Image (cartoon, grey):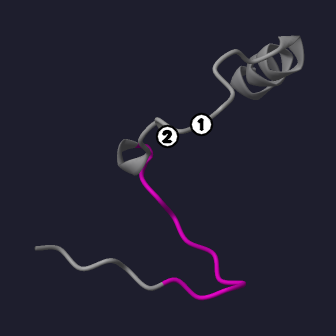
Amino acid sequence: MASTPTYEKGKLYYISIIDFRPDPSQPRKVFDEAFSEGKTFLAS
């Protein structure tokens, strides 16, 4: 079994996008227009 990494407060960590997983208990299922605009801004 893999161990859980220990993180230190205030330290910068690089995390691969592959390691991100959706949170099934996230109450927000629909994101508003502001989120969409931010996504467009970051993509440019």
How far across and down, in percent of the image, does residue 24 sit? 46, 35
State the predominant SS element of the stretch in magenta.
Answer: loop
Q: Is residue 28 left or right of residue 6?
A: right
How far across and down, in percent of the image, does residue 31 sit? 74, 18
For numbered disc 2, what is the local secondary structure?
Answer: loop
Query: Magenta residues, as a range?
Result: 7-17
For numbered disc 1, what is the local secondary structure?
Answer: loop
Q: Residues within 10 Å of mark 2 (few under 14, many from 20)?
A: few
- The quadrant holding residue 30 is top right
Say above or below: 33 vs 8.
Answer: above
Using the numbered discs, state the Cα–Cα distance from disc 2 to disc 1 in whole angstroms.
Answer: 5 Å
Q: Are marks 2 and 1 in contact (CB under 8 Å)?
A: yes
- If the image is split into quadrants, where does the N terminus sit? bottom left
Query: Which residue is pictured at 69% across the width and 27% down the height?
Result: 28
Query: Which residue is pictured at 78% across the width and 15% down the height?
Result: 36
Q: Residues within 10 Å of mark 1 (few under 14, many from 20)?
A: few
Task: From the image, tell me which residue sits under label 1.
Answer: 26
Q: Is residue 31 left or right of residue 34?
A: left
- Is residue 15 found inside the magenta-colored segment of the image? yes
Task: From the image, tell me which residue sits under label 2.
Answer: 23
Task: Point out the residue furthest to the top here.
Answer: 33
Say which mark, if any, is on residue 7: none
How far across and down, in percent of the image, does residue 44 sit? 75, 20
Query: Which residue is pictured at 74% across the width and 22% down the height?
Result: 39
Query: Which residue is pictured at 85% across the width and 16% down the height?
Result: 37
How far across and down, in percent of the image, does residue 4 sit? 32, 77
Q: Is residue 11 left or right of residue 14?
A: right
Q: Amino acid at mark 1?
A: Gln
Say above or below: 12 vs 17.
Answer: below
Q: Is residue 12 left or right of residue 3?
A: right
- The quadrant holding residue 8 is bottom right
